[in-house]
Amino acid sequence: MQLDEVRQVAEVEVIIKLQKLAMRVHVDTVVSDYAVRINRATRNFPGIERGAGPRGGIAILTLAKARAMMHGRSFVTPDDVKAVASVALVHRIEPAAESRIDGIDASMLLTTLLQQVEAPRQ
């Protein structure tokens, strides 16, 4: 797709209003802790050279709130967190050289990591 083919689908004001609405979505401390545990796990996970910093956790929760709102809920579930974690973190981690040599990229590492970090029961 070329730049001149991109078309506007929403006004800036609408996007800002939606962002403000998403900020109001409730996150229980148990769900917030789950996002933090995922983010922290990137820092000592086998195959990851450099894990995500604190902004990674913030990004997970921001995206999870938006996802919850898009699904018509006023609260975030562990499934919301798990669904957006890779998107929030994939560019924030660096696979170790061994992983890269083995053809394992950041997305694959995060998929494995998410299977190993236990989600809270709903």
Image (spheres, rainbow, N blue to C red):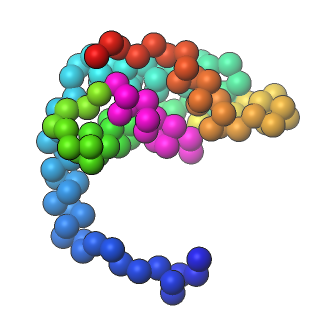
Single out the residue that lies furthest toward the front: 71
**Which quarter of the figure is the C terminus placed in?**
top left
Image position of 21 (left or right of 4): left
Instruction: Tell me where the magenta segment starts and ends, as one range.
Output: 78-91
Q: Looking at the rendering, which quadrant does residue 60 occupy?
A: top left
- Asked if one can make out residue 57 in the rendered structure from this viewpoint, the answer is no
**Left/right of residue 19 with respect to residue 94 in the rendered view:** left
Q: Position of residue 25 (x, y in %)?
A: 18, 38
Quarter occupied by residue 45: top right
| Identity of the residue drawn at 20% across and 57% down | 18
Q: Quadrant of the N terminus?
A: bottom right
Between residue 23 and residue 40, name the one nearer to us: 23
Q: Which residue is drawn at the image coordinates 18% and 70% (left, top)?
A: 13
- In this rendering, the count of numbered labels is 0
In this view, the residue farthest toward the right is 101
Q: Is residue 85 above or below residue 22?
A: above
Q: Is residue 57 above or below residue 15?
A: above
Tell me: 73 left or right of 110: left
**What residue is shown at x 23% (from left), y 19% (from top)?**
29
Q: Which of 122 and 114 lies nearest the eye of the viewer?
A: 122
Is residue 89 located in the magenta-colored stretch of the structure?
Answer: yes
Q: Is residue 115 visible?
A: yes
Q: Residue at x 20, y 43 (%)?
A: 72
- Residue 99 image point, x, y percent: 77, 30
Look at the picture and state if 95 lies above or below 38. Answer: below
Residue 77 sits inside the magenta stretch: no
Picture coordinates of residue 50, whole percent (x, y): 62, 31
